[in-house]
Image (cartoon, rainbow, N blue to C red):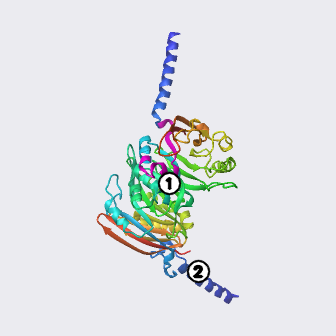
Amino acid sequence: MGTLNRIMKTVCGYGLLVLLVVLPSCGDNEGGGNGSLPEWDKSKTMHIAVAGKTDGSSLLASGEDDAGLLSLLRSRQSATLLLKDCEVSYGNITVNPLVSLAYELRRIPVFGKGMPVEGGYSGNGFLLDHTLAAQTEKEVSGNCNIKSVETFVTNNETLDAVLATLSVVNQEDVEQAAGALASLLRDGTLVVGFMQNSWLEEFKAAVAQRVDGCRLETVTAYADGVSLFVLSSDKWVLRESASEEEGAYMVSDLQVEQLY
Amino acid sequence: MMRKNGLLMKRVVCACLFCAFFLVAIPGGAATRIKVLDFNIRKSGELAGYQVKPFADLILEEKPDLVALQEVDYRMSRSGNKDFLTELAANTGMFPVFAKAIETDGGEYGVAVLSKYPVANSKIVPLSAPDGTKERRVALVCDVEFPDGEMVRFVSTHLDNSTDEVRTEMVRDLNSSNVISGNNPVLLCGDFNATPQEDAVAAGMTRWKLVGDVANTFPASRPTSKIDYIFAYPSSRWNVFSYRVGGNTISDHCYIISEVEWER
């Protein structure tokens, strides 16, 4: 009986050890837990180009000439474009450069409201290459909202996906953002967002507390210390990213594979 | 006696001043004023040579907060493969949302919304298609947050040009929880292809306030029937300040425009 107990304890101990090694979490998973990934299936890979200002200022401030950005984005192959920090205002004159850019790039614009600015909002904008079935907004705080859109993994529109974005601009919103994102992550939403690099550890821990096996990858940092990150459950994996600076702009090309 | 009356007067005046202070000092008095425009644009501007500009000019002149459009083409061959709505948005600065009802002619065809303010949520509600339906139809349901923080639901739809029975079925969907959510404010606009006397409107829309009157809206050249509507829900909490039927030569429908107020 005693021998059996010892064997059982040893088996359980090894089992627990194996589980600890196998089960990844955001907290101990800097590389995204990519150790045992299947071969990269490019036919299930979403291409996203993320554009922002290198110095971290607003990408489309009211009245700013967008010709440089336009030519940079025209050269992108990505079906989905994400623009960091666009401003819209609707006082006596409505200024909405995101929609002009969408028209020029033959895309469908979706604005994700972020922080209030004078006469309007600053927020991130999706430019999609298909018409929209649904969009949702989830409030984190008065300065932070999560915008989700129903989209597709590739432009042949066979695999569905939900893509979300947010910008966290106050450290006190980090915990709240993790809480608001948890249910989206569990449902398989892919999140591309922005926050100060120094807050990412706290964010990573807060998400890992709520969602098992999530992946958080930092892609690039802007001059103001804000980082672009990719966050998801184990349904997605960031396979490749490359960032390119041109003039005042930085464009990051992301390739994220949907694993199941 | 005189002194007693004087005291009473003083108290009444003080009470009035007190009330007046609160009426003036509390901002907004709890109402949201909205200017709304509904327009069936006839095959994305067939009568305007499929040009966006005349529609943009109209919107810029009328300055609505919300626009509901019907018969909107997305990259259809007949209208030059253009994305009519995004071009219209680029010309007006408004936020666009398009809803596909069907795929046809190499593109998509449906209804749309333009909003001056950011759209928080949007979804497409497919309408019932009982026997006798000519074409699949949808309702585009958008939630728009106004600068005073009020979230208003705005809906654009286009009922089938078949029978009153089919449209009555479709109207049931407009009364469902997909569109109405508790006592939250909803403005529903569209081409109902039904006159006020037909069941789809007379019996189907009894829970809603008819915004404006029953002045004819179709055909635009010489209107003989009312088939375009703005409805508001819940009916008791909406006030109508103005309503007008706009004649034009760029569509076969008149546009309708109204200023309404939601009492919070």
**Residue type at tag 2:** Leu
Residue at far top of view: B1
For residue A16, the mark is 2
Q: Can you say whether B120 is above or below A28 in the image?
A: above
Residue at far bottom of view: A3
Of residues B248 and B11, which is closer to you in this image?
B248
Q: Can you say whether B86 is above or below B191 in the image?
A: below
How far from the left and from the top, in percent, is residue B6?
Answer: 49, 14
* Left or right side of B156 for B168: right
Q: Residue at x 50, y 12 (%)?
A: B3
From the image, state whether disc 1 or disc 2 is nearer to you.
Answer: 1
How far from the left and from the top, in percent, is residue B160?
Answer: 62, 51
Does the magenta-highlighted stretch encompass residue B137? no
Position of the C terminus of chain A, as image quadrant, is: bottom right
Q: Can you say whether B210 is above or below A122 in the image?
A: above
Please identify the quarter of the rendering in which residue A101 is found.
bottom left
Q: Secondary structure at mark 2?
A: helix
Residue A138 visible to the viewer:
no
Q: Which residue is mark 1?
A: B97
Tell me the crowding category of disc 1: few under 14, some 14 to 19, or many 20 or more residues within 10 angstroms, Cα based.
many
How far from the left and from the top, in percent, is residue A8?
Answer: 65, 85
**Residue type at tag 1:** Val
Q: CA distance from mark 1 to mark 2?
A: 51 Å
Position of the N terminus of chain A, as image quadrant, is: bottom right
Q: Secondary structure at mark 1?
A: strand
Q: Chain of mark 2?
A: A
How far from the left and from the top, in percent, is residue A24?
Answer: 52, 76
Magenta segment, which residues? B28-54
